[in-house]
Image (tube, helix red, strand yellow):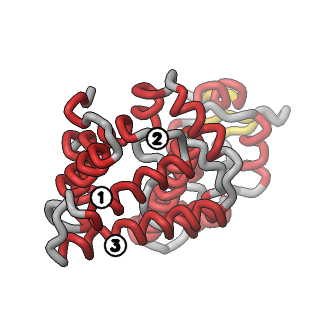
Amino acid sequence: MSLPIGEVARVAGVTVRTLHHYDAIGLLSPSLRTNSGRRGYEPTDLDRLQRILFYRELDLPLADIAGLLDGDEDPLSHLARQRDVLQGRIERLGRLVAVLERTMEARKMGINLDPDEMFEVFGDADPGEHAEEAGQRWGDTDAWRQSQQRTSSYTKADWQRFKDEQESLGADMVAAMDAGVAPDEARGMDLAERSRLQIHEWFYDCPHAMHVNLGQMYVDDPRFMATYERQREGLAVWIRDAIVANAKRHGVDASSRS
């Protein structure tokens, strides 16, 4: 029992024009052809078409498909090579998706850099890792709106300068801890004030009371804690205590944290 070309096209999900092309190049010629030129496809033809369409899904050129179906090459070896190609493509696409997601999250934080610029500044770090959560928690606050407004105009050079300042501050805090400086000593409190001013200047107005709340979050939120602990064990608590001491130095009742 043979099927006409229109029925084969419908069942296979291809166009009649495609089947005509396959016939013209000798890739798939119907077993039956009437005197009037009508084509009839038998089960063996449909089986070949199924394999052709499978190979096309792998993006193989038609010439390669013909070689697989009609040549002496081992189809399994060819497919194994194609699998390796596809695996590499999957990995590249996965990296591309990661870059796009990272860029989208950064944009939510007001970081308007293209992927190359963002990689140059932040490397493998994701500056917008918690953008969605941050938007949910603080999106209706004046601080969030102020931060969005400021950062939307920052260039790559601005972000690089901020990153350099941030890394310098972190290194100085670690050095203070290594030197045995207590959080409530002048050096510790000065570093806490430097941290507050960095937020104040780069993102949003950050009075001491707000800074105290942030310092407590550095300890309470495991993700913030882990960020500081990677720099030095105990750093998160040290910073929190230095922030509290600095607030008290400026006359703020740090015990009224909310």
Q: Which x, y percent locates residue 106? A: 54, 46
- Is 163 drawn above or below residue 257 in the view shown? below
Does 218 sit above or below residue 121? above
Please tell me which of labels 1 and 3 falls first in the chain. Answer: 3
Q: Residues within 10 Å of mark 3 (few under 14, many from 20)?
A: some
Quadrant housing the C terminus: top left
**Residue 46 got which mark?**
none
Task: Pinpoint residue 219: horizontal percent, then vertical percent.
Answer: 20, 45
Foreground of the two, 121 or 82: 121
Name the residue beneath numbered marker 3. 171
The answer to the question of whether label 2 and label 3 lie on touching residues, with beta carbons closer than 8 A, is no
- Please tell me which residue is depicted at 48% across the width and 73% down the height of the picture: 73
Identified by mark 3, the residue type is Ala
| Residue that numbered label 2 is attached to | 206
Q: How far separated are the C-alphas under marks 2 and 3?
A: 22 Å
> Which one is in front in this view, the residue at disc 1 or the one at disc 2?
1
Residue identified by numbered label 1: 189
What's the residue at 45%, 70% (across, down)? 81
Q: Is residue 49 visible?
A: no
The three-letter amino acid code for the residue at tag 1 is Met
Eye-nearest disc, 1 or 3: 1
Mark 1 or mark 2: name the one nearer the start of the chain.
1
Question: Tag 1's secondary structure?
Answer: helix
**How far separated are the C-alphas under marks 1 and 2?**
16 Å
